[in-house]
Amino acid sequence: MKSRNLATISLAVMACGFLLTLFLPDNLAVVLLRGGFEAGLVGGIADWFAVTALFRHPLGLPIPHTSLLLKNRDKIIQSLISAMENELLNKESIENKLRKIRFVSLGSGLLTKFVARKKARADMLEQLSTFVQRLPVDKAVPYLQTAVADYIREAELGTAADSIVTKLMNDGKDIAALDYALEGISGWSSRPETRAMLGKIASEKLAEVKLGGLKGMAFQAFVGFVDADMLGEMLQGMLQSGIRDFREADNPYREQIIQEIRVALFQLVNDEARILSLKEWALEELQGEAASAFLHKQLEALRGKAVAMLEEDRSSGGRKLFALYALLARRISTEKEWTESWEERIRASLIAFVEANHYRLGVLVKENLDQMDDASLVNMLEDKVGKDLQWIRVNGAVCGFVVGLVLTVIQMI
């Protein structure tokens, strides 16, 4: 039974009881009951009037000092806002609560519980796979070209090349490159076809030489004595011998060649004209269709590998994802200073947000209350506190009845 109905019934009981006792023969019990019902009726009507006067005009009559809530609507709203801002949800209490919360630890714990679930990992990987598949790779190519072109324009290629060359030389890579080249030349020169080629070239060039006198006669005699095979064998032997000599660490010519290589490399990386020309060539090639097609192909291949990796891990229950998360979590747990720093950053950001937007609580409450008409506001208040107020009417009727009995007894005495 609703409290409003119960209060009305209590008032009706007092009224009916009082009317009934008026028609009964007078005796002690009737007199006592009449006094009790009379006082209960007066108390119930008085409390009904008081409770009703809070929300509306009793019986619709504009009696002074009634419908108090609507007449003091603005004061009540301002009091409610003030209580919320200064008592219930004041900035100091919110900030004190925020200072007690460890956001990184809290977030890490919640995330760990989430990632620990196999289904959650599978769903996450599925969403990631869908996201990767929907990435507009073709639209990313122009941005990638622009980013690379900007980097090339601003990059100090000469300085970078100089550092690279210096590092390679310090690591002995120039010597290793020379030995590799000598080994390749040695292998090439030892082939039969190389011997034949060298003999043929030498024979043709010797035939073109024109000398007069005794030197010419002697030279022609030498040329007539050797054929292409002999010349090829001689040149092949000399080339093999020279390569063996260049491979020896104490060979003076080897050191000269290494020095020449180093000088040539440094001249190349410090040639600003060549570096500028190289930049221009790279920029021109980068903006071409071939470069666009190449980048698009590479991005598509990268996307395919990423999707395949995500699908493979999803089929296995997301073990790799969990292992990656566990690795990151353990790493973060060891970084105490980093964690504390982020705790302070998050806390400071939230406190600053509260300080900057705390007034919006009152604004929001006022906006919501202003949107309600008088009837809606009264109904809301009656719904929230009306139940307790209706019990005042019930208590008033009961207490009046008891007080009426006591007063009747006193009168009789």
Image: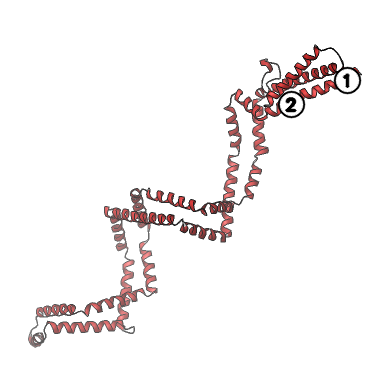
Q: Secondary structure at mark 2?
A: helix
Secondary structure found at label 1 = helix
Q: Which residue is mark 1?
A: 409
Question: Which residue appears at 75% of the width and 16% of the height?
Answer: 16
Give the answer, above or below, for where 348 lies relative to 362.
below
Quarter of the figure with residue 157 = bottom left
Q: Pick the quarter of the image with the N terminus.
A: top right
Mark 1, other Cα within 10 Å: few <14 / some 14–19 / many ≥20 = some
Task: Determine whether, in the image, residue 295 is placed left or right of residue 121.
Answer: left
Q: Nearer the viewer, mark 1 or mark 2?
A: 1
- At x 77%, y 22%, the residue is 397
Compare residues 213 and 250 and report the one nearer the observer.
250
Q: Position of residue 367 (x, y in %)?
A: 57, 30
The image shows residue 378 at horizontal and vertical percentages of 63, 25
Q: Position of residue 36 (x, y in %)?
A: 82, 20
Residue that label 2 marks: 392
Marker count (numbered): 2
| Left or right relative to 155: residue 18 | right
Question: What kind of residue is marked 1?
Answer: Val
Indicate the position of residue 283 as horizontal and vertical percent values.
Answer: 31, 56
